[in-house]
Image (cartoon, grey):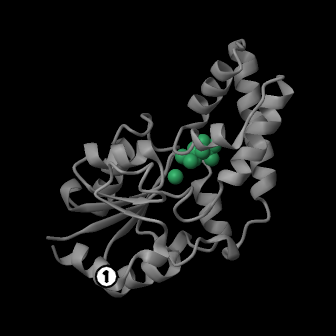
Amino acid sequence: MKKGFIFDLDGVIVDTAKYHFLAWKKLANGLGIDFTEEENEQLKGVSRVRSLQKILTWGNKSLSSEEFTDLMAKKNDDYLSYIDTMDESEVLPDVHKVLDILKRHKQPVALGSASKNAKPILEKVNLLQDFNAIVDGNDVSRAKPDPEVFVTASRLLGVDPKACIVFEDSVAGVEAANIAGMVSIGIGSEKVLGHADYVFKDFTQISEDFLNQLINE
Ligand code: G6P
Ligand code: MG
């Protein structure tokens, strides 16, 4: 059966969490709310709107819808200024290796990300041309764990969802892949991503034999 490989972006291809952290911390601190690395972890895979809602809940603050919209825009401006200098060197270890193997085996590859900044980031790290389809936060209305982003990617690839394999670093993303009936591969810690079909610390742990097994099973 024809297979399709879908990659999340943030935390899978590049580590943007550190930049999101700086931007959210600036915003939270500006509202008199403390913001820790642990809280930032909980925002992985979570949409921009939902992230701000969570920060406000943690800080016990409420905003008018106008203030909310303004702060979202400000956060994104700050985030964009932090990622401005990103380049190829920020691609996580062995991502190129895995993409090259899939290309050699003529496997269709898609991006399935919640980020509205996915395309400019792929462009900065020179990977835009490596994806046969890109689905990001601008294309979907339902956030992970809703499987919309991955199902849309499978449709664009012309591959049955059940024949898709998803690489994800977030709890919600692995859940979304599982709900879509896709093979879920967690990139990160077994403790956090135990609900994935397979978990690897990073792409250095993923061999060509394993990818061959996924292609052929
Ligand atoms: C990814 C990240 C989240 C981020 C979301 C939206 O899922 O893991 O931390 O909030 O994308 O990103 P954006 O670039 O649109 O703010
Ligand atoms: Mg992610």
Quadrant position of residue 166: bottom left
Q: Between 190 and 21, which is closer to the camera in this rendering?
A: 190
Q: Is 118 situated above or below 23?
A: below
Residue 60 horizontal side relative to residue 195, left or right: right
Residue 216 horizontal side relative to residue 101, left or right: left
* Mark 1 lies on residue: 106
Helix, strand or loop at mark 1: loop
Percent position (x, y) of residue 187? 45, 61
Percent position (x, y) of residue 66? 73, 17
Percent position (x, y) of residue 127? 56, 72
Quadrant position of residue 75: top right
Q: Between 158 and 160, which is closer to the camera in this rendering?
A: 160
Quadrant position of residue 25: top right
* Residue drawn at (79%, 35%) of the image: 74
* Residue drawn at (71%, 71%) of the image: 87
Q: Residue furthest bottom?
A: 104
Q: Residue furthest front?
A: 191
Q: How many marks?
A: 1
Q: Is 65 situated above or below 103?
A: above
Name the residue type under label 1.
Lys
Percent position (x, y) of residue 83? 75, 57
Q: Between 130 and 5, which is closer to the camera in this rendering?
A: 5
Is residue 115 visible from the viewing direction of this image?
A: no
* Residue drawn at (53%, 39%) of the image: 46
Q: Quadrant of the C terminus?
A: bottom left
